[in-house]
Image (tube, helix red, strand yellow):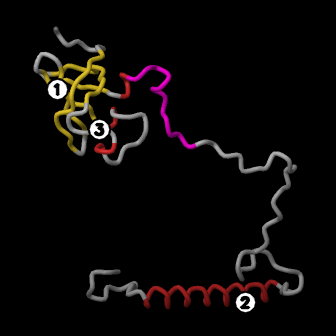
Amino acid sequence: MAIEVGMILEGKVSGITKFGAFVDLPDSKTGMVHISEVATTFINEIGDYVKLGQVVKVKVLALNDGKISLSMKQALPKDQQKRGDKPQKQNFRKQHQPYKPAPPVTSPGDYEWQNSRKNAPSSFEDMMSKFKQTSEDKMSDLKRGGESRGYSRRGNGNGRK
């Protein structure tokens, strides 16, 4: 019997590798099932799905230079070929509760995104002075943090910059 693309055959698993399984077919032929064609789910260990000597149904996918590409999942009936372990979509909003918008975002941490009316400087010069002081404080914090990890603007002989 000549093996042709599209045929569904039975064969015995004769070898298992990390990338697939070799299957002995009729007429002393051997084909390979790639790990992605073993099951409809993701596979970490092929040994969890096939064992040496196991008889499996396979579909012939391709014949190239004497190599036979096989698929176990495409040999399954059509209703079983759909991806089996897809995560179910979860409905995070409870059906019986109406939608409530999130509360408005206030300034995260201690950073002030907008001037509060209490601390608002009265003049442009005051605002510039406050901005300059805040910028200098942040720059010194960044420099201290970088130096403590061994990073600086100049090379320190360790190959880090």
Q: Secondary structure at mark 2?
A: helix
Residue at 80%, 83% in the rendered image = 124
Q: Which residue is mark 2?
A: 129
Figure check: 57 above or below 146:
above
Which picture quadrant has residue 132?
Answer: bottom right
Task: Report the label total.
Answer: 3
Say which quadrant the N terminus sits in: top left
Mark 3 and mark 2: span between their CA atoms? 73 Å
* Front-lying residue, 104 or 1: 1
Say which quadrant the C terminus sits in: bottom left
Figure check: 129 above or below 58:
below
Inspect the image, locate mark 1, and give the three-letter code of the amino acid beneath it: Asp
Check if residue 84 falls in the magenta segment: yes
Q: Which residue is mark 1?
A: 24
Indicate which disc, 1 or 2, sits on the residue closer to the N terminus.
1
Residue at 25%, 38% in the rendered image = 20
Image spot of residue 23 (x, y percent): 20, 29
Q: Which residue is mark 3?
A: 50
Inspect the image, locate mark 3, and give the three-letter code of the amino acid beneath it: Val
Indicate which disc, 1 or 3, sits on the residue closer to the N terminus.
1
Image spot of residue 113 (x, y percent): 75, 74
Mark 1 and mark 3: span between their CA atoms? 14 Å
Image spot of residue 16 (x, y percent): 20, 40
